[in-house]
Amino acid sequence: MQDAREIALNTLYKIEIGEGYSNITLNKELTKAKALSKNDKALVSQLVYGVITWKLTLDTIIRRYSSIRLKKISSWIINILRMGIYQICYLDKIPESAAVNESVKLAKKYGHEASAKFVNAILRKIEKNEIEKLLDYIKEQKLTYEEELSITTSHPLWLVEKLLEEFADKDFVKGLLEANNQNPRIALRANRLKITRDNLVKLLIENGVDAESGNLSDSIFIIGYTNLDDSLCVVQDEAAQLSVLKLNPKENDIVLDACSSPGGKTTYIAELMNNKGIVDAWDIHEHRVELVKNACQTQEVTIVNTSVMDASEYNENLKEKYDKILLDVPCSGLGVIRKKPDIKWSRNEEELKDIVVIQKEILNTCSKYLKVGGTLVYSTCTVLKEENENQVEKFLEEHKDFRLEEEIKLYPNINNTDGFYIARLTRI
């Protein structure tokens, strides 16, 4: 039977070879590991998210002590080293000897005798104050500010340079990058069709969950996890909730959620409409439409019509059909690094160019489906201007029949939410 460290190692390997996002892959592995105790499952999560979050910093430490180039080290062994160093440097409750010995055992199993000796030799050199030593080492090198920030906050250099260029505020960018490495509070949204926010808070507390009311009408913050009926609430960040609240759907409205998967915003739209009216929910992939259907069934929402649709392709039959349109468009996802730290390693600048094109096509196409006087909300879970305010500015220049009513920019270091952008537009 695999122990916590071996499950963490396998999870990291699967994430690295692209089997799925960290949160999805980790959940699958933990679901399979039924025999693991609650504490061991917590350790698996801690190791997986910790290693992915601090990967660049950990790799810099490995480079200092390894005579072998990182690219020459197998994925199994490099992740064993990362896990070992992470335990020594970041986890106070784990003895150094345990971190080293368990790492050597894994190296024997997933490598060979030489691999085990290599892992042992490096980890024996690692001390509890290794991060402080690394900072001293960085100061001795002739690095740019961007390079230093990249290593110390464990973000790719291209992203650090891009953020510094966009925001031109070193303190803000440093704060943003540091906030990306923090564990966020878990936010829930009460299903107002079934229960009030305040009653759900009471119910959670009665069930031993540390819960408190959030900043929005249906939001709650919790510590730990809950075994309550899934129909009563859904995990959803306050930033995502706010985008739906700004859409302000009403009973008997005809609403389009054009990029609806996995369905959290779709169900909230229906709940705010008191399950009266019509919500058309689209996604380009059939398996993602199934996620929306499942969300609606769980939340007991009955007014949603799901369809496999490409929101960038115009359909003349839908011209000026909708009272409200939510465009939570595909984006780089760089605002949710706190929850999916692997995003910062999987994204690149070339990919961004393609995403921006898709966003523009969806906005241009779906805007034609809005009635005069109707509301359109354009939102993303990223902090980059080219996906956010620049996109909306260009749209307004080309569409004089639209007016910007409100623009909201949220950042984890300022608002303690996901990085998020919301623009509320009216067709005039």
Image: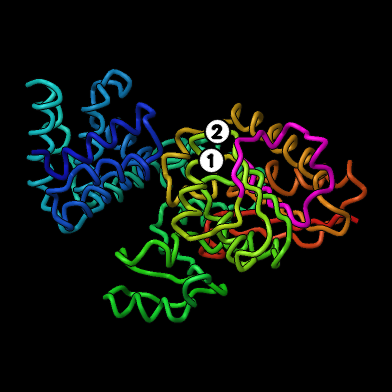
Residue 225 located within the stretch drawn in magenta: no
State the residue at coordinates (69%, 63%): 249
Other residues around mark 1 within 10 Å, as few (<14) / some (14–19) / many (≥20) = many
Q: How is the image coloured?
A: rainbow
Residue behind mark 1: 289
Residue 152 visible in the displayed image: yes
Comparing 406 with 192, the one in front is: 192
Q: Position of residue 341 (x, y in %)?
A: 42, 44
The tally of labels here is: 2
Q: Position of residue 243 (x, y in %)?
A: 64, 59
Q: Please state if 337 lies on the left or on the right of 26 as rendered.
A: right
Quarter the C terminus occupies: bottom right
Q: Position of residue 401 (x, y in %)?
A: 91, 50
State the residue at coordinates (54%, 31%): 348
Magenta residues (range): 305-330
Say which mark, if any, is on residue 285.
2
